[in-house]
Image (spheres, grey):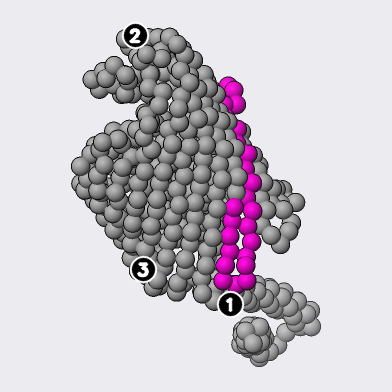
Amino acid sequence: MSRNIHWCTAFAVLLGNPLSALAADDAAPQSVGEQIQQLKQSNMQLEQRLQQVENVAAQAQTAAQQAERPAPSSAGAFNPAVAMILSGTYGQFKQDPAIPTTGFAMNANHAGYVRGFSLQESELSIYANIDPQFSGVGTFSLAPEGGISVENGFVQTSSLGNGLNLKFGRFFSSLGYLNEQHSHVWDFVDQPLVYRVLWDNQYADDGLQLKWLAPTDMFVEIGGELGRGLGFPGTDRQNKNGAGVLFAHFGDDIGIEQSWRAGVSLQQTKRVDAVSNNVPDLLNTTGGVSNSFSGDSRTAGLDFVWKYSHNGNIRERYFKVQGEYFRRKEDGLLTYDTTGANLTGSYAVTQSGWYLQSVYQFMPTWRTGLRYDWLDPGTAGVGSSIAADVISNYAFNPARITWMTDYNPSEFSRIRLQLAHDDSRQGLAENQVFVQYIMSLGAHGAHQY
């Protein structure tokens, strides 16, 4: 219809201008030659005006088509997708959280919480498709006392095919079940004790990961990792591959109401001059001593998760049970009291731990959960040169029981109350109270099963 209007306009211009000019000229007597010459000039003017009108019509038609064309997709607005997680706690307890778990003083013991009101780490996440072959993820931890660290920063492939996926950069390892999950999706304020003492709450490294997803109805995922060895219990070996992980995960649905996943993990790394401060010793040195360990560290793990929801409706109600078991063997040389006696001898120990927890969503916005932790420090084989100074058997099993309930008005917010009886430090049992908030600014990527 717009084309017809443009052509009508063109003919109106032609009829209203050149032809009227010709009619005016007819009143004057002219020779045939003059009339022919004038006719030629008029034809040229007609052609020029026609070309001008056609150009205007083409421009108008293009503008009309652009106006009718749908707006560009807004998908680009979410590339990259950005989200911020804000969280904070109030903690009430007697003992200093820096006191190490009994029997695991040579391990990491960062509780991840403090007394009173505290802003917890904030998490800034950026995700984007790079091109048809790659996508990238950057997760940055903003410490409450200041400073920014890279929690995750990796690139992964999207077109290898045959169920293969390659990831490279810094990432949370796929060992176990909880390790890959960011803190804002934990079911409790803190990690289980076994994660605290064996992985310093969470194991991450710089390196490569290759996964293979089997083309079967049942979920089968097998993979391996090579890393620099930055994550505890390893030490940075720079130009050498300091750590390796193998894992396999299996899962399936049972009808529409149940699903499960199980896994096995193996990790090996080296510790070189790994110093642990304030380690208790047989001489009861005030404040403990600093010991240094160099040797091999090998860990095996099992994990299992089972979920149930009536009629498969997880938005209304669901019940989840999960548990993990890890067993670590370390063998090498231990230097006792590096700043004093500085005695070195052989040291070998096998330590283990597990947790079992359940979470029940009894209303669309309310959940409650219960968790039990248990650790075995093991009995160490200590060389004769340091046997008189280093404790080989603590004869104590750290344990803890935790209850929580949380309110989730939407997928972007959570308020949690947690109570715990902590008996992880011999002679220092205590009751703990936590209140926590977790808020998401912007849509956050979905997490795995």
Tell me the residue at 56%/71% (across/down). Answer: 257
Q: Is residue 318 magenta?
A: no
**Badge nearest the viewer, 1 or 2:** 2
**Badge nearest the viewer, 1 or 3:** 3
Mark toward the start of the polypeptide (1 vs 3): 1
Residue 300, position as x, y percentages in the image: 57, 38
User: Which residue is under mark 3?
Assistant: 366
Mark toward the start of the polypeptide (3 vs 2): 2
Q: Amino acid at mark 1?
A: Glu
Question: Could you tell me what secondary structure mostly forms the magenta stretch?
Answer: strand
Tell me the residue at 33%/11% (across/down). Answer: 339
| Residue 205 left/right relative to 388 | right
- Which circle marks residue 77 in the picture? none
Give the structural element (helix, strand or loop) at label 3: strand
Residue 373 in sight: yes
- Which circle marks residue 68 in the picture? 1
Pick the residue in front: 145 or 231.
231
Q: Are marks 3 and 2 in contact (CB under 8 Å)?
A: no
Q: Amino acid at mark 3?
A: Trp
| Above or below, comparing residue 411 to residue 224 in the picture | below
Measured Cα–Cα span from mark 1 to mark 2: 84 Å
Residue 284, position as x, y percentages in the image: 27, 20
User: Which residue is under mark 2?
Assistant: 341
Mark 3, other Cα within 10 Å: few <14 / some 14–19 / many ≥20: some
